[in-house]
Image (cartoon, rainbow, N blue to C red):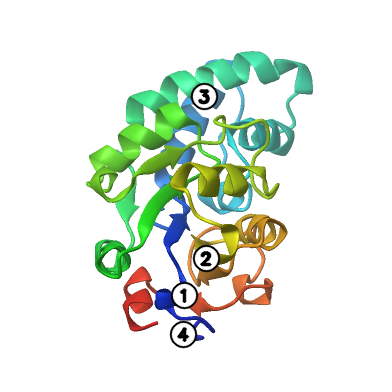
């Protein structure tokens, strides 16, 4: 653990990422992508490869997988439709909460922070996943990757989420797992803490510019 250089009393709200931060969804991605690839008559993709592609939205994920298996970019539209079909059917079935998530969210709420979930996952996937994992009751707002004109690492989603919460960025903590979250937070003016697990495009997360790192969301209770 690298204790965050911050105090929760300095914040009015927290924005929390979903995939790789609260829920380990790699199994869902792999299952849906491989079902898509079967439909297209393409070779399967392994979890180790998928893990490095996750985090920039479903469109980027499908495009990256097609390139990985050597498929033509022209197959994207059909592939994306098949991916959506399969993902919504298995959403949450091959995923699990990370240890400490419930404790961490409860600690944030106990400190009086208002909470929003902001993810690059499509809204139609994010909302039912939160419900399936018993997390939906923690969040006043939930915004997917298709909620705004641009996705993280652009700062727009964070700025719009702060606006929806009625908070200023400087008093809104971003909690995520990757450089996407950190870059968006820096550009928006939000302090940021990253978890040491999750999906950071195959790069060491502790090399990312952030205000601190935690091995579990439960550690936020001590800040």
Asked if the residues shown at circle 1 and circle 2 are in contact, with their CB atoms under 8 angstroms apart, the answer is yes
Mark 4, residue position: 1
Mark 1, residue position: 10
Q: Is residue 93 above or below residue 53?
A: above
Q: For numbered disc 3, what is the local secondary structure?
A: helix
Between circles 4 and 1, the one closer to the viewer is 1
Mark 3, residue position: 83
Whether residue 38 is visible here, answered yes or no, is no
Mark 2, residue position: 171
Q: Position of residue 32 (x, y in %)?
A: 46, 31
Q: Is residue 142 left or right of residue 168?
A: left
Crowdedness near tag 4: few (<14), some (14–19) or many (≥20) residues, C-alpha within 10 Å: few
First along the sequence among labels 1 and 2? 1
Q: Position of residue 198 (x, y in %)?
A: 49, 61
Q: Quadrant of residue 181?
A: bottom right
First along the sequence among labels 2 and 4? 4
State the CA–CA distance, disc 4 to disc 1. Answer: 21 Å
């Amino acid at each position: 653990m690298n204790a965050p250089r911050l105090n929760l009393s300095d914040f009015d709200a927290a924005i929390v990422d979903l995939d790789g931060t609260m829920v380990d969804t790699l199994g869902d991605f792999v299952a849906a992508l491989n079902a898509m690839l079967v439909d297209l008559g393409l070779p399967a993709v392994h979890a180790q490869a998928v893990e490095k592609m996750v985090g920039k939205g479903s469109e980027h994920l499908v495009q990256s997988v097609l390139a990985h298996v050597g498929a033509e970019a022209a197959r994207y539209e059909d592939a994306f439709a098949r991916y959506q079909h399969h993902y919504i059917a298995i959403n949450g079935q091959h995923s699990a909460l990370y240890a400490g998530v419930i404790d961490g969210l409860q600690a944030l709420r106990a400190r009086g922070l208002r909470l929003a979930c902001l993810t690059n996952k499509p809204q139609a996937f994010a909302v039912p996943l939160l419900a399936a994992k018993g997390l939906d009751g923690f969040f006043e707002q939930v915004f997917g990757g298709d909620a705004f004109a641009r996705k993280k690492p652009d700062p727009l989603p964070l700025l719009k989420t702060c606006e929806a919460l009625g908070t200023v960025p400087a008093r809104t903590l971003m909690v995520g797992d990757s450089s996407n979250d950190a870059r968006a937070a820096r550009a928006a003016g939000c302090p940021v803490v990253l978890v040491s697990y999750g999906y950071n495009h195959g790069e060491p997360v502790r090399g990312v510019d952030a205000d601190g790192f935690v091995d579990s969301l439960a550690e936020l209770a001590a800040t």
